[in-house]
Each structure stands twice: as structure tokens, then as C-alpha cells.
Amino acid sequence: MPRRSNLKMMNRRWGTVIGVLGAVGVALGAIGTHVIKSRVTPDRLETWKTGVFYHLAHVLALAVTMALADRIDVTWCRRLWLAGTIVFAASLYLLVLLDLRIMGAIAPIGGSLLILGWLAFALAWTKASPTEGS
């Protein structure tokens, strides 16, 4: 576990990243509703919505780690969720915007990173001492 002074600095950085990632997610959701909707097929709009959903769901998961960082080591779940969110959601956004079919093959890599992040989260709890994780 990081020392308290390092923990505060890391949380400050992560708070900034999470805030920006959340704002981008909300903006992309609005773009999907107000701009993209009339320009793509219903299937592509669903793809966009899936990207926004996983984007924002993992922003919330990252936000929860802010409260848990002094109880469990959230380093790897944060890294994996951030990378997974970017790869997964961005591949879906690019698939819709540019009709790049190859992005459909990239999305599972991002999804795998998200899954690994959840496994890292579970592992962090199993490693926590009874006083840290209670």
C-alpha cells in the first residue's frame, strides 16, 4: 500500500482523470442523442450507446476507488479500468463515426482489460488485511 502522502497525491491525479473522463462520457452521450442519432443506423446508435454505458459505468467504478484507496491497493484495477474504458469505448465510437469495421475486433481487447480490472479489484480485497478491508 502507498504511504499516506503518496496516496493523497495519487488520488488528486486520479480525481482529475476521473473527472475529465466523466465529462467526456456525458458529452459523448449528448452527442449521440443530439447529433449522431439522425446520421447513423439504429444498430450503430446502439453501438454508440453501449460505448457510452461502459464508459460511464467504469468512470463510476473508478470514482469508488477514491474512497477505497486507503483500505485496499486499487492500483491495478484503476490502470486496467482506465485502459479498458479507453480502448473499449473509443473502438466503439470510432466504429460508429468512421465505419471502421476493424474497431469491432479491437473492442474485445478493451473488454478483456475491463474484466481483468474487476479481477484485480477482487484480488485486492482478498489481499487486504481484516482491518484494511472491513
Image (cartoon, rainbow, N blue to C red):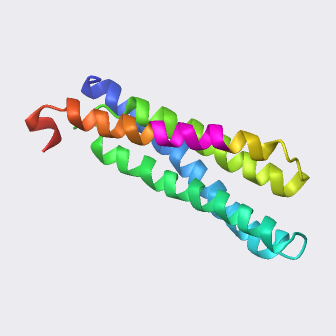
What is the chief secondary structure element of the magenta stretch? helix
Figure quadrant of the C terminus = top left
Q: Nearer the viewer, residue 103 or 75?
A: 103
> Would residue 111 be counted in the magenta stretch?
yes
**Which quadrant of the structure image shows residue 85?**
top right
Residue occupying image coordinates x 65% and y 45%: 88
Residue occupying image coordinates x 83% and y 57%: 96
Is there any visible trace of residue 130 in the rendered image? yes
For residue 66, above or below residue 39: above
On screen, residue 93 versus residue 15, left or right, reads: right
On screen, residue 99 versus residue 92, left or right, reads: right
**Which quadrant of the structure image shows residue 120?**
top left
Residue occupying image coordinates x 83% and y 41%: 102
Image position, residue 86 (x, y; %): 64, 42
Residue lying at the far left of the rendered structure: 131
> Would residue 104 be counted in the magenta stretch?
no
For residue 8, above or below residue 108: above
In the image, which residues are magenta? Answer: 108-116
For residue 65, above or below residue 128: below
Is there any visible trace of residue 13 in the rendered image? no
Image position, residue 122 (x, y; %): 31, 40
Image position, residue 83 (x, y; %): 58, 36
Image position, residue 124 (x, y; %): 28, 33
For residue 14, above or below residue 33: above
